Image: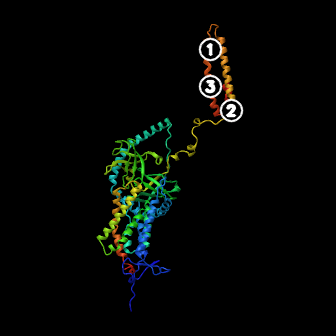
Amino acid sequence: MTAGAPADSNPLCGRSPVAFRDGPFENLKVPLAWTAAVVAVVAMAGAALLLVSDRTTPDGGSSYGAARGAAASVTGPVSGVFAAPVRWVGAVTDYIGGYFFAVSENRRLKAEVAELEPWRDQAIALKNVNARYEAMLGLRTEPAVPMVTARAISDARGPFNRAKLVDVGASKGVRIGNPVINEHGLIGRVTGVTGGVSRMVLLTDVASRTPVLVDRTDARALLTGDGSDNPRLEFVRGAGSVQAGDRILSSGDGGGLPRGIPIGVAAKGIDGSWRVKLFSDRGAVDYVRVLLFQDFGQLIDPNALNAPPLAGLTTAPPPNAEQAGAIGDAAARRQAAAEAQAARARAAAVAATPPATTPAAAQARPVQTRPAQPRPAAEAPSAAMSPQTTPAQAPEGAT
Amino acid sequence: MRRPVAVRVVGPLQWIVYPALAAIAATIIFATPVQLFGLMLPEPVFPMVLAFAWPLIRPSMTAPAVLFALGLFLDLFWNGPLGLWALCLMGVYVVILLSRNLLAGHEGVIRFAWYMACTLVAFLVAYVIVAVRAGNPPAILALIGQILPTLILYPIADWMLERFDDGDIRFR
């Protein structure tokens, strides 16, 4: 099927026919606009089908993760090559800006250093006190999370997608769900990984939901992106729990993020909703760090989680014949020793008691020795718990 | 003796393939995470120009197929729902294809009004789809921030129409 017909045979613009030159449809001519429309409608149907079938997987990835990964691994290096001249221009503008604004920036930095020095001293003191408290209370603190440094090579900034490509992938240990930060705070999370390139969805993406807390009141909320630069705070618990200027941190609820990563400052939006001015917007997000933190499950040994609970909370297995014999022997020895001790006590009491002693007083003394009798019965479970050591210890207790 | 007349034949390579590659390259370049004087680069939908210009230049079966591929590229590159921009761009293509006779002969403001209307409808469809899928409507200001750069691209569509329309005498 080829396009092409003399102009004289088709004077109307857009009515160029398609001739089926071979076969039984040789004389059949279809207007080219119709064929184009058919292709377009079929493509629209295909697009709709893709749209319906594209779902988010439970781990935060996409049902078309393979296609997205292939596209990312192709466009990642290409983006790096294409973007190099643009990056050079950006470096030149930074240089020019730094040259012209050096004095004002120097003044601002001096004021900032003067303001931060007392905070540094307090932080050192508090760190020391906190470490002592943790040691005294035996708290199991979270271990340090390893990080991988990466460079952002591509950026989607539209209203429907806020995402970045970074130049590290599964070869560096990056996995879906890893948080990504820069020197100022949290940026987003990894949603797709290939061998050398990863895709991260920003906090500002319309599909992003992040559990956060208000540092001042410890109130919980959900940070919801909407494609703008300042994501919304939703489901804030408690009246008056948020004020303008409150620091917003990651809460760690759900286990997807470590607790306490700085995110931003609360502010009232023009629509009246609470929004967050992100710390990560204080500078260009070019170099980032990927926290190799999957969830709380990676912080401990999975075998320890799957191990049976404390042995003392379970029923001991029934003893075998040898253990039952040893247990019975130990119990008999203890009972005999207890009876012998009681008999000796009674004999000593009879010998020491004057003849005028009332029978009631004489009968009371063996009662005082009775608390020794329950001991073998109380120690029987421990004998069952460690059958190898109990027979050797039982004679010593009996003597 | 008649002198031979040079016939300029504009094939799909000139008016489909090269512009498509240029749109891909421009999309990648404008996705660079760089700030120029404190401002990020805009993020227009470059294939919107092609979705408007291609059906006006001439009907073709190759153009919608390439446009569909461009939409998928945008979805994959921007990490959007797969099929979102493919559907919106194809919608613009179909509307303009069906309106060729209405648009024939118009230039200037009328043509730009059509381009603007098609762009707004495409973004409206994308907005509704994303809002329904995410359960969260995107910000209007961010939406305007992508619509305006896309509208500014209209001179490219106009240049393509002047350059390629009737470039092939077989379609006159």
What secondary structure is found at the residue carrying circle 3? helix
Q: Position of residue A343 (x, y in %)?
A: 67, 17
Work out whether mark 1 precedes mark 2 in sequence or the reverse, and give the earlier one. Answer: 2
Residue beneath disc 2: A324
Q: Which of pointers 1 and 3 indicates the residue nearer the eye?
A: 1
Residue beneath disc 3: A375
The subunit carrying tag 3 is A
Q: Amino acid at mark 3?
A: Arg
Image mark for residue A230: none
Disc 1 residue crowd, few under 14, some 14–19, many 20+, Cα 10 Å: few
Q: Amino acid at mark 1?
A: Gln
The subunit carrying tag 1 is A
Q: Quadrant of residue B113?
A: bottom left
Residue with the most extreme left position: B109
Question: Considering depth in this image, is A332 or B7 the residue closer to the camera?
Answer: A332
Disc 3 and disc 2: Cα gap in Å? 18 Å
Q: Position of residue A281 (x, y in %)?
A: 38, 53
Q: Quadrant of residue B170?
A: bottom left
Q: Amino acid at mark 2?
A: Ala
Q: Is residue A309 above or below residue A327?
A: below
Disc 3 residue crowd, few under 14, some 14–19, many 20+, Cα 10 Å: some
Residue beneath disc 1: A363
Q: Position of residue A196 (x, y in %)?
A: 51, 59
Q: Position of residue A275 (x, y in %)?
A: 35, 49
Question: Pointer 1 and pointer 3: residues touching (CB < 8 Å)?
Answer: no
Whether residue A85 appears in this view of the structure is no
Question: Considering depth in this image, is A286 or A326 the residue closer to the camera?
Answer: A326
Disc 1 and disc 2: Cα gap in Å? 36 Å
Residue at the image point whose x is 39% and y is 75% from the top: B58
Q: Which of pointers 3 and 2 indicates the residue nearer the eye?
A: 2
Residue with the most extreme top position: A356
